[in-house]
Amino acid sequence: MVPRTPRRSLVAIGAGGLALSLALAGCTAGGSDSDGGATSLTFLVDNGEATVATAQALVDAFVAENPDISIEVETRPQGADGDNVVKTRLATGEMDDIFQYNSGSLMQALSPDDTLVNLADEDYVGKFDDRFVQSVSTDDGLYGVPMGQSMAGAVIYNKDIYEQLGLEIPTTWDEFIANSEAIKQAGVAAPIVQTYGDTWTSQLFVLGDFNNVLAENPDWAEEYTNNEAKYVDEPALAGFEHLQEAFEKGLFNEDFASAKYADGVTMVATGAGAQYPILTFAAGQLMTTNPEAADVVGTFPLPGPDASTNGLTVWMPTNTVYIPKSTEGDKLEAAKKFLAFLTTPESCDIQSEANAPQGPFVVDGCELPDDVPAMVSDLQQYFDDGKTNLALEFLSPIKGPALEQITVAVGSGITSAADGAAQYDEDVKKQAQQLGIEGW
């Protein structure tokens, strides 16, 4: 069992830029009414099984303590369709009384100053991790409350293999490669797992390296957004170079081109693979397919050139809860009461019971459960020590759609790191122009 981890504030991740959508059929957007003296609300969430289960568990606990308020959980599609539903409902003033959506750049695309209720003066805001505050704020307000945990883009690894070979957690890229070479020479496992059967997993060498980019240039995200920094140049080029180097040294599993994400998690859990750059929401997959390995699979950051700046690239909770400005009067007060409940330790415990935690909470006073997988508990110390940086998607609205295809090509030896970085710079150029960002 993993020792109980005292709760602290953490950084969020962005992660996972997941856009969500409303179920169009059967929804009553904005349709909450007073009901027999009670205030009734609707709460719009994406239709992911885990999201719905968590939202319903929180609502059940809240209304049990507040019988004068009723909340109906409604669902919308995930992905671009759901994203369009959220934006359309906000634009037409027909949004539900409360809704769940992403933080970071996707929240910024909602024009929050014009469409969302400013929560900056609520008492609970002081309990939020600074990086979460950054991910849900503009210059004029703070708009979201977390429903979930942060996560990291990092390396999950098999602790037994590290112990067997006497390896130490690497804090530089050179040490990571040395460990990988030692594992290859020992012949005990695939040194680095890659799973291009699910192409999105190929991006972690680049996306998870962003802590190291900011360590070298803290203004890189702003310069990138202003078309003044590029992936073809260091420090951002390093992520592509690392991917090329690992392929050329023959450090990947033999079936890297066809293996899938679930295969990768199982490989590390069973010792068929030693290390796997991935998002730590893999804790959920681990506990589904290989719960016996909960204490075997750990996590460390993707290392860069300098051990003194070794740290995690983190994503804030992708499930963040907002109140639209169309919610007014008694409904607004009830909605604010529900959001305050979401910031309590009771709420965090309910969230942990509904779904396996994927990283630390970002609300002061919340604790990870005793039996959280080592993959998650290993993250806590980096948060406590302030050795974290937000993923790029929380600092810039620009992310090209073709990155995963490009990183598959680089990781397969088809495209060089330099050419892949140049291709991605062109890819993001199209998106920046579509977003109307100045300087592109």
Image (cartoon, grey):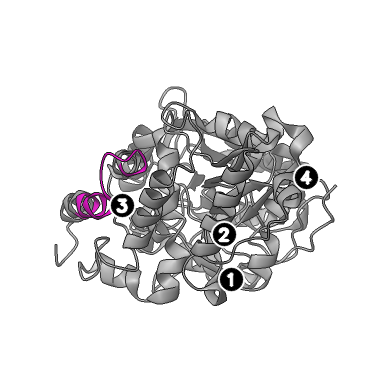
- Residue 215, picture quadrant: bottom left
Visible in this render: residue 325? no
The first of marks 2 and 4 along the sequence is 4
For badge 3, the amino acid type reads Lys
The mark found on residue 217 in the picture is none
Q: Counting residues from the N terminus, which is met first, the one under dot 3 or under dot 2?
A: 2
Q: Would you name the residue on which mark 1 appears?
A: 387
Asked if disc 3 and disc 2 are in contact, CB closer than 8 Å, the reply is no
- Magenta segment: 410-425
Q: Is residue 297 left or right of residue 331?
A: right
Q: Which residue is mark 3?
A: 399
Badge 1: residue crowd in 10 Å (few <14, some 14–19, many ≥20): some
Instruction: Indicate the secondary structure of the residue bearing disc 1.
Output: loop
User: Mark 1 belongs to which amino acid?
Assistant: Lys
Residue located 22% across and 69% down the image: 226
Foreground disc of the pair 3, 4: 4
**Would you place residue 308 above or below residue 182 in this image?**
below
* Residue 248 against residue 341 in the figure, above or below: above
Relative to 19, say whether 208 is above or below. below
The CA distance from mark 1 to mark 2 is 10 Å
Label 4, on which residue? 295
| For marks 3 and 4 on the same chain, the one whose residue lies earlier in the sequence | 4
Number of other residues with Cα within 10 Å of mark 3, as a class: few under 14, some 14 to 19, many 20 or more: some
Residue 301's tag is: 2
Assess disc 4: are there few (<14), some (14-19) or many (≥20) residues with their C-alpha within 10 Å of its C-alpha: some
**Dot 1 and dot 2 residues touching (CB under 8 Å):** yes
* Callout 4: SS: loop
Is 424 within the magenta? Answer: yes
**Of marks 1 and 3, the one in the foreground:** 1
Residue 334 image offset from top left, x and y in percent = 62, 52
Front-lying residue, 113 or 152:
152
